[in-house]
Amino acid sequence: MLPGPALLLGALLWRLAAAGDEELPTAVNITWSSINFKTILQWQPKPSGYFYTVEIHGRTSDVKRKCILTSETECDVTDALRNVKETYTAHILSVKPAEMDNFEEPPFAVSEKFTPYSQTVIGKPEIKNYSQDGSKLNVVFNDPLTPYVFPNGSFQSIQDIFQHDLEYKLYYWKDQSSGKKDITTKSHNFEVSVDSGKNYCFYVQGIIPSRRENRNGQESMVLCTSVGRNILDEYGTEVFIILAVIAVVVITLAIVLPVVLCKRKKAKRARAVREKELLNGV
């Protein structure tokens, strides 16, 4: 009588063990997204019945674990990439909570290599102030800040990290014109010669000339000076033409209308005189 139930129990345990050994899905479409050294790791798919844990592996640094047992498909790994010149890969582990103490390595996917120093995108510079004095255009701007801080708690700028590898370019052009000029500096201000009395628009962009990719950073907002600005600069030629036509019409009416009214008045007076003469003759 015993072999039957024992055999059934053994088969059940074998099926449970086999089901437990099924390998979990691993992450796909792993991407790095980094601006001013703030770095987010993203992947797919959304987990169901399991979780993800991210491991950051550097060539010369210790493995760092981030977003342990997360059900999300993104992870902020900025503070695990403090050595910005190091090259990293991310291992995204697919795990069940009960397996965290298991000595067997869970299934995982490996990202592309990522080096923050050469791949993070340079963000938008902030225009601090600007002025146009005669034939000189002056523009002062601030560096974008990074998430990393100095020992005193102040945030490091991208200039603090890139040093002499970073330069800035000012693009400027006459308002209502499409012809751009540019000038480069390693400081935080520009002074360029422009046509006196003409308004200019401009923006600033950070550049890392030594890079093979992501050389050009994000563009700052476009600003324009307002020296000697008139209605033609403000609203364009079309509005000026419309105003001119209206002015001509008003002037024409002012001249023609009195003449027409005067002629009508004279004609009415002459008709009255003729009618009176006819009555007197009768």
Image: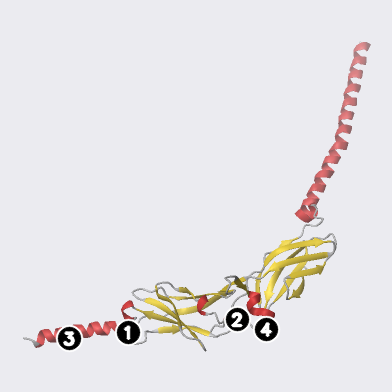
Report the quarter where the C terminus lies: top right
Residue 188: which numbered mark, if any?
A: none
Residue mark closest to the camera, 2 vs 4: 2
| Residue at left offset 86%, top offset 30% | 261
Amino acid carrying label 1: it is: Asn
Which residue has dot 3 on it? 10
Helix, strand or loop at label 3? It is: helix
Does label 1 or label 2 sit earlier along the sequence? 1
Q: Nearer the viewer, mark 2 or mark 3?
A: 2
Mark 2 or 3, nearer chain start? 3
Q: Amino acid at mark 2?
A: Tyr
Alpha carbons under labels 1 and 2: distance apart = 36 Å
Q: Badge 3: few (under 14), some or many (20 or more) residues near its Cα, within 10 Å? A: few
Where does the image place residue 100, in percent across and percent down from the top left? 34, 81
| Residue 173 point in image, percent of width and height | 77, 66
Element type at mark 4: loop
* Residue at horizontal 83 percent and vertical 40 percent from the top: 250
Q: Are marks 2 and 3 in contact (CB under 8 Å)?
A: no
Give the residue pinned by disc 1.
Answer: 102
How much space separates mark 2 and mark 4, taking CA atoms? 11 Å
Which element is circle 2 on? helix
N-terminal of the pair, mark 1 or mark 4, is 1
* Residue 117: numbered disc: 2
Residue 121: percent from the left, percent from the top? 61, 75
Q: Which mark is residue 210?
A: 4
Q: Mark 1 or 3 closer to N-term?
A: 3
Image-quadrant location for residue 197: bottom right
Q: Quick one: label 4 or label 3, which is nearer the N terminus?
A: 3
Quarter that holds the N terminus: bottom left
Q: Which quarter of the figure has residue 28?
A: bottom left
